[in-house]
Amino acid sequence: MRNETTGGFLMLGAAVLALVWANVASGSYTTLSETTIGPSAIHLDLDLAHWAADGLLAIFFFVVGLELKRELIVGSLRRPAAAALPIIAAICGMVGPILVFTLFNTIGDGDMRGWAVPTATDIAFALAVLAVIGSRLPAALRAFLLTLAVVDDLLAITIIAVAFTSGLEFLPLAGAAAILVVYYLLQRRDLGGWWIYVPMGVVAWALMHESGVHATVVGVAFGLLTRAHHREGEREAPAERVEHQVRPYSAVICVPIYAFFAAGVTISGESLREAFTEALPLGVTFGLVVGKGVGIFLGTYLAAKFSKAQLSDRLAWSDIFGLGLLAGIGFTVSLLIGELAFRGDEEVTDMVKMAVLLGSLISAVLATFVLGARNRAYRTIHEEETRDSNLDGIPDVYQDEGELEAESGEHGSRSTVSDSESGQ
């Protein structure tokens, strides 16, 4: 359940269930989504759809924050030279969709409020598609996608925090900030446990929600403030340990439930006609498919050509284009941004949701064809990466030739001795 691929498949199943339910029995689906629970005295009497978007996704973004922190401290983003290409790819993968969306909505007199919708990548869904394409994929391919997705998440979170904050209330915001400062100090001194941190997180979330800033931001903040470096005698850093504990709840419960409430769009002939003729949904769909794919490919190619950044020799340019298409699977965060951008306008929100679903589906299918065509090459690379000729438990690619020969000779001597002992 800690596997991101599992979460992607569950999310897909939840989305399909929502689509079927919304089109077979739309009344009961709407009634369920609009069921209100929570204390009204503190303005938390929200319907189930909002609890999923504002509450459950805060846990998802907490896991994203933990992953970001680990990557920044001990992971691929720790070395700028190694992370340069996927970082540039992520930035261009956001600029591209914005340009495509702007083009469609300027020419077609559309609605520019949705400019940020096609900018996000759903890493869980993308990894699920990648798992369908092939189980023996080069480490460089997955590392590139993960680094790109981590930076993409950071940029998407920044957009949510900056572009979709309205009616800011400074007192609740100051209260949430104070709790975050206390959490930071407790982390640095190794004080407290879940029985302190969980109530702190709940109160900070409620205050952030009251402040007007989207409440999911507090989840990212807690993740980024969690200590990620190991101390002497410590088996796991807190960020690593907590991510391991919380990820199953995020992947198996939070994200699929959000997908269920977000993807329930009623499909009709009219809605399909609008999706293929109106500027707004066309901008979203082509932003995800064309903007992401072309933006990531061109950004990576130009960076490799005109800078010292280099593409891994185990990757081809067709792989980068395929990953660009795969990054066009927006789903979770794109649906969230769509809801935030058009809050209160249900008809337009449903149109944008339809466009996100179409764009994500087209991106997934195209990526499957592009990357699937390289499956034979991927299997060869995977075999090279996992070959262990000296049987020392360390793949040969991590050892130089002299070391390999020495260890192979030593292993051969041990085998000879062992054989002679067996004979005796």
Image (tube, helix red, strand yellow):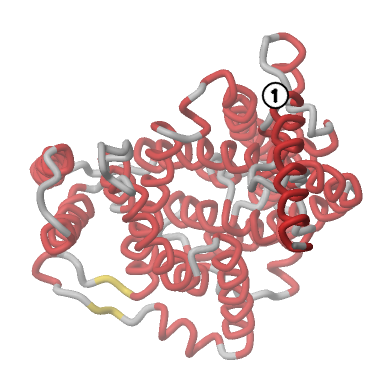
Most foreground residue, 194 or 100:
194
Q: Residue at x 78, y 58 (%)?
A: 134
Q: Work out whether residue 138 can be spotted.
A: no
Q: Count the numbered circles shown.
A: 1
Measured as percent of width and height from the top left, residue 391 is found at: 71, 48
Dot 1 falls on a residue whose secondary structure is helix
Q: Work out whether residue 243 can be spotted.
A: yes
- Give left or right: position of 104 versus 162: right
Measured as percent of width and height from the top left, residue 103 is found at: 69, 33
Q: Residue at x 39, y 58 (%)?
A: 244
Which residue corresponds to mark 1? 299
Measured as percent of width and height from the top left, residue 309 is found at: 67, 16
Measured as percent of width and height from the top left, residue 207 is found at: 15, 53
| Quarter of the image where the C terminus is located | bottom right
Eyeballing the image, is 45 above or below 91?
below
- Give left or right: position of 412 versus 283: right
Q: Residue pushed farthest front? A: 424
Q: Residue at x 33, y 48 (%)?
A: 236
- Give left or right: position of 29 versus 408: left
Amino acid under disc 1: Gly
Most foreground residue, 342 or 78:
78
Eyeballing the image, is 247 above or below 163?
below
Classify residue 3 by image quadrant: bottom right
Q: Residue at x 70, y 75 (%)?
A: 268
Rate crowding at label 1 as few (under 14), some (14 to 19) or many (20 or more) other CA atoms within 10 Å. many
Most foreground residue, 19 or 394:
394
Classify residue 124 by image quadrant: bottom right
Most foreground residue, 344 or 76:
76
